[in-house]
Amino acid sequence: MKGLAFTLMVMLFITACQRKPDSDNEHFVQQKTLQAQLDTFLQNNPEIPGIVSSWRLRDNSLIQAASGFANIELKEPMTVYHKMGVASNTKVMTATIILQLHEEGKIKLNDPIGKYLSHEITDNICVLNGISYGNLITIRQLLKHTSGIYDFVDANFINSTLYFPDKNYTPEDLLMYNVCAGQPYFIPGTAGKYHYSSTNYILLGMIIQKITGQPFHIVLRDRIFTPLHLLNSSVWTYEKPAAPLAAGYNNGTDISDDNLSWTWATGGVVSQADEMNLFIKTLLHGYFFKKRETLIAMMQTTTESVDEYGYEYGLGLMKYNFGKGFIAYGHIGSLHGYNSACFYLPLHDASFFVGINRGNAQPFLFDLMGQCYSCVVANYEYNPFQHPPKTSLPFPFL
């Protein structure tokens, strides 16, 4: 993270000083266009309570808009300052910490998880046809979802959290449910096999705690929130998010006061739109790592991980193709109350966060992503030869 503080100062300086009259006018047009797009989207999809879209552009200027309600009952308008659950975008942060520990020599990605977790866990977490494969699972396989471990976030589990909204879950509780709920999808590391499983990131959170000797939410704060001054970011249950918090709706019911301890290292972060923007842009500029190779490894995806929405998976990062060669790196998140997407576009040197305060909204999310992309940056491509970098930030993709 060397040079991170200086980089952030440069970002703030540029944001304050680089604007010119023409670009100010362009900024105003983009802002109006984005706002109109969000308003139209809600008119066409009245089942969505509220949405927010925030873009941090090449010069770190912001294009942000919000529409609809943060709280339906109170008729509270959604704003870009409302916090919401970012769900599985948390996985990117968990993976970042694991890769930092790898750089520090405290773990190796090809280490078996039994080196860090008890045999009670490894003996039972991946049993297929009466044979335990837990000792074969590596940290790399957890990161890439190639472990074959069953995903504890199934329909029965989600229903149980809705029936018992005050129940507190420990990571051990989640693993116990996992063992009882379903069988592994395949033997760990089977060539060509991939299956997304939030259980992988529960195990990674436990490994982080084992290596650091600190609770996961404290490690997250020390290594990510505090260095970036993300003052509005926290972890559900462990640090109650301060107002304003957008209510998250599941079938019309506000679940934002439920005990969401089960989300933890796999989906427990609550944040604001531009704080997530700043995180993903800083990450993809390489400032959380000492070596460029670490970031490149994080971005390497495999074709077997392509899903129905078209993304590929790397080491905690998704790769998404907007078409015409415009690739984005980040993650999507789905929680029964919130859906979100947070990505960095290297050819634009822009990051964005899109959030919806409703569960079961992934089709809406991808539609909204595409519409926001079209009206903010689709006609702009960053060319390092036409526009030499005006900051000290590296552009590792170009």
Image: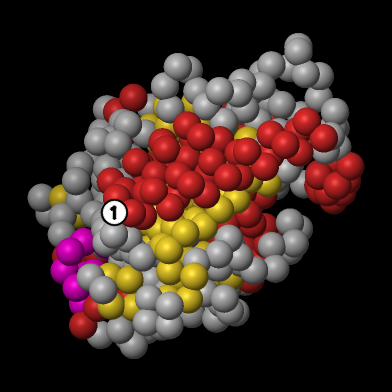
Q: Residue at x 56, y 35 (%)?
A: 376
Q: Main secondary structure of the magenta part?
A: helix
The extreme top residue here reads 385
Q: x%, y% of residue 142?
A: 40, 47
Q: x%, y% of residue 232?
A: 64, 69
Amino acid type indicated by mark 1: Asn
Q: Residues within 10 Å of mark 1 (few under 14, many from 20)?
A: few
The mark total stands at: 1
The extreme bottom residue here reads 166
The extreme left residue here reads 129
Rendering quarter of residue 57: top right
Is residue 38 found left or right of 15 in the rendered image? left
Secondary structure under the numbered disc 1 in the rendered image = loop
Instruction: State which region is magenta.
Output: 153-161
Q: x%, y% of residue 349?
A: 65, 31
Query: In which quadrant is the C terminus drawn?
Result: top right
Rendering quarter of residue 338: bottom left
Q: Residue at x 33, y 71 (%)?
A: 249
Residue assigned mark 1: 45
> Looking at the image, is 395 positioned above or below residue 60?
above
Residue 342 appears in view: no
* Residue 352 inside the magenta-drawn segment: no
> Looking at the image, is 115 positioned above or below residue 379?
below
Front residue (pair 40, 384): 40
